[in-house]
Amino acid sequence: YPELKPVQSINAHPSNCICIKFDPMGKYFATGSADALVSLWDVDELVCVRCFSRLDWPVRTLSFSHDGKMLASASEDHFIDIAEVETGDKLWEVQCESPTFTVAWHPKRPLLAFACDDKDGKYDSSREAGTVKLFGLPNDS
């Protein structure tokens, strides 16, 4: 492998960056931070082109859709924000019953998988449930 070295450092947020993702087209990368902001960066120019500020808690997870047109972000808020990358407009707000740990778009379809801090209330409400949920199936609105 070639030797890797740091190329540039960018002050992206006033607090810790928690997550970072590149879009599948290679045009943008997004960062999520403890300041509850998601920032979208142009890869070639290394400038912030847009900020998303709909979350109130530190951003835990990000994911771009397969075509790079949508960006899902989530935190301890009880919803997942899905935004249009080019405009920043909110497309959907996926309601959750608990904080979301991870989101991931399907590599070829507009289907979002996510996992939350669910508790299995059937037998012991303190026990984790370990469920994965999907958004984007034909009956979702």
Image (tube, rainbow, N blue to C red):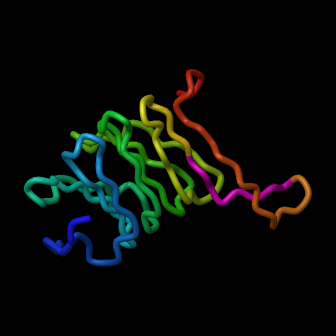
The x, y position of residue 124, in whole percent, is 88, 62
For the point 54% across and 63% down, which residue is it? 76
For the point 37% across and 36% down, which residue is it? 66
**Residue at the top extreme of this rendering:** 138
Residue closer to the observer: 43 or 32: 43
The x, y position of residue 14, in whole percent, is 26, 77
The x, y position of residue 96, in whole percent, is 60, 49
Task: Check residue 32 for magenta coloring.
Answer: no
Magenta span dominant secondary structure: loop
* Relative vertical location of residue 44 with respect to residue 70 in this rendering, above or below: below
For the point 20% across and 53% down, which residue is it? 50
Would residue 88 appear left or right of 55 to someone viewing this image?
A: left
Would residue 116 appear left or right of 19 to someone viewing this image?
A: right
* Relative vertical location of residue 35 with respect to residue 117 in this rendering, above or below: below
Q: Which residues are magenta?
A: 114-121
Task: Check residue 118 for magenta coloring.
Answer: yes
